[in-house]
Amino acid sequence: MAVMRLPGPSLRILYAYSGVARPLSTGAGRRLRGRAGPAREARDQEVGMSGRDDTAAALAAAGAYRRLAEQALLDRPLARDEARALLASSDADLPAVLWAAFAARSRHFGRRVKLCVLQNARSGLCPEDCGYCSQSAVSTADIRRYRLLPVADLVAGARRAAATGASRYCMVTSARGPSASDIAHFARAARAIRAELPALELCVSLGIMEEGQARTLGEAGVDFVNHNLNTSRRFYPAICSTHTYDDRMATVRGSSRAGLGACSGVIIGMGETHEDLIDVAGELRALAVTSLPVNFLHPIEGTPLGARPAPGAADCLRALALFRLANPRAEIRAAGGRERALGAAQGLALFAANSIFVEGYLTTPGQRHADARAMIRALGFEVEGEGAPRHGQDCANVM
Ligand code: SF4
């Protein structure tokens, strides 16, 4: 892989703000690795020299949160009191918290940022009552409502996603769960997309799914099934009454047993407590999810949570850091609502997250891919796969 650039502008800002003039020497990095043993050494080789420098420098700048980062680098679960301290930390401590998160992020993902694109394949026709969702049976939100998109439209969406430089394309339906004909439909779409765009990662989010349905989709070329836990078991009944936490856990487990990657995440800012965030971070670790989208409540008028204020930027960044440190090897995606909740600070999400969604969400707009790309470069990160020929084609041909 390409060796990453040494610190870009925002990294320098954080270094300066944290009282760290520049990254530690590679010698310091070697000493750190020496304690970690051969397995860690092998993983370091995947990241590249400046990734190792980043990890060592981040540890040095993590201050009171260094122990959390060290635990994450050893892939050990966070101690609950340390997780509490992180979430309750002051804004003045935010740079140190982000450094701690960046230590784990840089170890496993360097400075790479994966772009993902969502496709709302059936909008606004759900019988469930999730309080945050504009597509639910109880929502009066002014959104587009349409039935299942034809396979040709799903394939066209995949082409558009590839043309933005996205590595992952996720097809989502509003539904309690997929019917047999839905599964056949997405299997046809997956085969067509896989034939044309073999390198594009394919994810589906179709609601409560059985293991056999996931297996069928996997055989057709789907890589991941998404089904978010969204929040803690304790808080879940406050946001949904038509299905249970166990329904969601069963879908994630069944998809894993079927051999697909487990994608499951959260929504920050629905009224949960710090204890709830720590609980769900632990649940996702126990499920061994490899993909963890962190959404930030975008209160939509006409939904039960429409009058809630959007969560604050600093709280969102602390939560992102918690999920990174609790799940250091997972791809953490800064997802829906990040533009609104984080505002001008959204680039700081990249210190914990290694992936973002571009070109909008299911019913709300999002950052355009060109703006995201400019943000990523300006902050000293790099778009995953950028510069190499993508998906076996010239993107100009599909614009
Ligand atoms: S199941 Fe999905 S689409 Fe349906 S209300 Fe809940 S979040 Fe919305």
Image (cartoon, grey):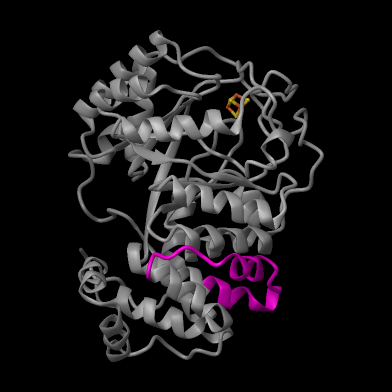
Determine whether, in the image, residue 296 is placed left or right of residue 38.
right
Residue 10, visible in the rendered structure: no
Residue pictured at 31% horizontal, 23% vertical = 217
Residue 47 in the image: above or below residue 343: below
Instruction: Out of 299 and 217, give the one closest to the viewer.
Output: 217
Q: Is residue 77 magenta?
A: yes
Determine whether, in the image, residue 70 is placed left or right of residue 240.
left
- Image quadrant of residue 39? bottom left
Determine whether, in the image, residue 127 is placed left or right of residue 161.
right
Specify the segment rendered in magenta: 74-98
What x and y, as percent, mark residue 333?
Answer: 47, 50
What x and y, as percent, mark residue 117?
Answer: 43, 38
Residue 49 in the image: above or below residue 275: below
What x and y, as percent, mark residue 150?
Answer: 40, 13
- Image quadrant of residue 377? bottom left
Residue pictured at 54% horizontal, 86% vertical = 16
What x and y, as percent, mark residue 374?
Answer: 45, 59
Residue pictured at 48% horizontal, 81% vertical = 12
Q: Residue furthest right?
A: 307
Residue 172 in the image: above or below residue 280: above
Which quarter of the figure is the N terminus placed in? bottom left
Residue pictured at 25% horizontal, 56% vertical = 387
Instruction: Out of 93 and 245, give the one closest to the viewer.
Output: 245
Determine whether, in the image, residue 189 is placed left or right of residue 204.
left
Q: Is residue 259 magenta?
A: no
Which quarter of the figure is the C terminus placed in? top left
Quarter of image, ligand 1: top right
Instruction: Out of 61 and 140, give the one closest to the viewer.
Output: 61
Q: Residue furthest top?
A: 181
